[in-house]
Image: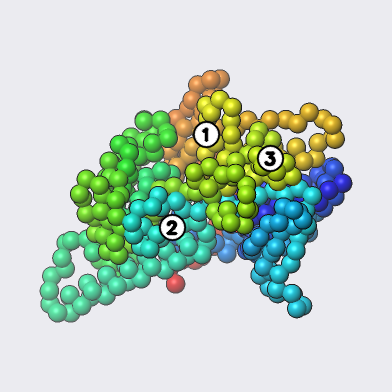
Amino acid sequence: METVVIAGGGVAGLDLATRLGRTRGAVRRVILVDSAPTHFWKPLLHSVAAGLIDPAHYHIDYARQALESGFEFVCGEIVGIDRATRSLEVRLRRPREDAATATVHYDRLVLSFGSVTDFFGVPGARQHCLSLDSVGQAEAFRQRFLNACAATGARRDAFHEAGLRDTSAPLVDIVIVGAGPTGIELAADLRHTVDTLVKYRLSGLGASRQVRIRLLERGQRLLPGLDPAVSALAVRKLRGLGIEICTGAAVSEVGPREVRTEDGRVFPAALTVWAAGVRGPQLAIAPALGANRNGQILVNEQLQTVDDPRVYAMGDCSSLVQPDRSQMIPPTAQAARQQSAFLAGLLTRRPGATPPRFAYRDYGTLVTLGRSGTVGILLRAVGKRNLRVRGAIASLMYRMTYERYVMSHVGLPRMIGHMVARWCRSKMLMPVKWH
Ligand SMILES: Cc1cc2nc3c(=O)[nH]c(=O)nc-3n(C[C@H](O)[C@H](O)[C@H](O)COP(=O)(O)OP(=O)(O)OC[C@H]3O[C@@H](n4cnc5c(N)ncnc54)[C@H](O)[C@@H]3O)c2cc1C
């Protein structure tokens, strides 16, 4: 009977804690540690950044989840891991009594502290780009975006008062670096937000075209990981939304007001978002664990770190060393959830049973383009054949991914309750969180 400590309650960590808490088996105690008091489903961050959803309505409270699912929750930032004494040092978020830090002991440790944006060492990128790694960052982007729109609106009003004609040039330039699913979904959501601001006369913008949204992609096409037909469809829909797409644009430098590419192009930018890659975070807290070039911890097919059989890693912070290297496991929620389900089985199996091997299965990708619908591909959906999806069915599938995730944590009745509450709010409140 052992104590399993899960370091990081994201998509993988919360899922594992819930599964282990409910089944236990050979596990005596399950402790989840996260620096935040509530969990947010990261794939919705682009909608938070665009102000289309209020994160407060999408949180899962760790303390409640812990009580209902049979695990313990410690709210604090993990600042050190001592593998010799098998303990974590946690800086508690709310100091209790006289101690601001706590020591949490483990028999087995699962690292699941996600990823951070990889700026690939591009000069100026870290200083001048915004990224979407957390709710705080998405909210910071939303504020700056709305401020930029409001400032542009004020300039336009001043133009009119001075009797000058409004210029037709776009006045707010948003540059999104990276045309993978995150960049594309953010671009489509931002366009929707701008249209709403104009419709409700909230920012002083006279027309949607006053905000120019550009997607820069170093490769030759959008959604490079997906079927070319899906990517062509996404291009058509994005152009329909008035979003400019620049392929073959490898960013070489980012300044406070512009983005430069290797081929000499210069793009003006009031706001630049970096959505082009991730890397494992803060290896300093897990010293002497082998990692790949991206700082992701190396694990074997049981998701055990290659240096310590008592320490496991899953989700974005891990990298699986596969013997044939035929398939890299992508840093996605889909992979994170498969890994947490696998580890839940592994950690509760009968002693002496042959340990299973983790095998990733890619079910495909869905990309939502706001009001232009959803496009995507389902892999091996019909026998061995892939299926391209679009329209209402694709949009429904996209939405159900999140609802099914919520249901697996809080159950069907509460999931329906959340859906109904969100629908009611959408009928009563502004469609954009603008203050
Ligand atoms: C905008 C955006 C859109 C995305 N869209 C999709 C999508 O459509 N489909 C898809 O499959 N994937 C998508 N992803 C990727 C997906 O969100 C990640 O792959 C997934 O969240 C990884 O899960 P994880 O558990 O490894 O990490 P995370 O979900 O990031 O969780 C990490 C957790 O660790 C905690 N933590 C970190 N450091 C510490 C510390 N020192 N102490 C205590 N706690 C700590 C954090 O608070 C967090 O709760 C998207 C990502 C982004 C940013």
Instruction: Kindly identify the residue that appears in the image at 60 percent across and 44 percent down.
Output: 290
Q: Amino acid at mark 1?
A: Met
Closer to the camera, 133 or 184?
133
For residue 370, say whether it is visible: no
On screen, residue 118 above or below 165:
above
Ligand 1 contact, mark 2 (Cβ < 8 Å): no
Q: Residue 103 at what x, y percent from top left?
A: 75, 63
Q: Earlier in the sequence, mark 3 or mark 2?
A: 2
Instruction: Kindly identify the residue that appears in the image at 75 percent across and 37 percent down.
Output: 346
Q: Amino acid at mark 3?
A: Gln
Q: Quadrant of residue 145?
A: bottom left
Foreground: disc 1 or disc 3: 3
Q: Earlier in the sequence, mark 1 or mark 3?
A: 3
Foreground: disc 1 or disc 2: 1
Dot 3 alpha-carbon crowd within 10 angstroms: few under 14, some 14 to 19, many 20 or more:
many
Dot 3 corresponds to which residue? 304
Q: Residue furthest left?
A: 164
Foreground: disc 3 or disc 2: 3
Q: Earlier in the sequence, mark 1 or mark 2?
A: 2
Instruction: Kindly identify the residue that appears in the image at 84 percent across and 42 percent down.
Output: 25
Mark 3 touches mark 2? (CB < 8 Å) = no
For residue 249, say whether it is visible: yes
Q: Amino acid at mark 2?
A: Ser
* SS at mark 1 in the image: loop
| C-alpha gap between disc 1 and disc 2 | 24 Å
Q: Quadrant of the C terminus?
A: bottom left
What colour scheme does the image use? rainbow
Dot 2 corresponds to which residue? 131
Task: Give left or right: position of 349 versus 193.
Answer: right
Dot 1 corresponds to which residue? 328
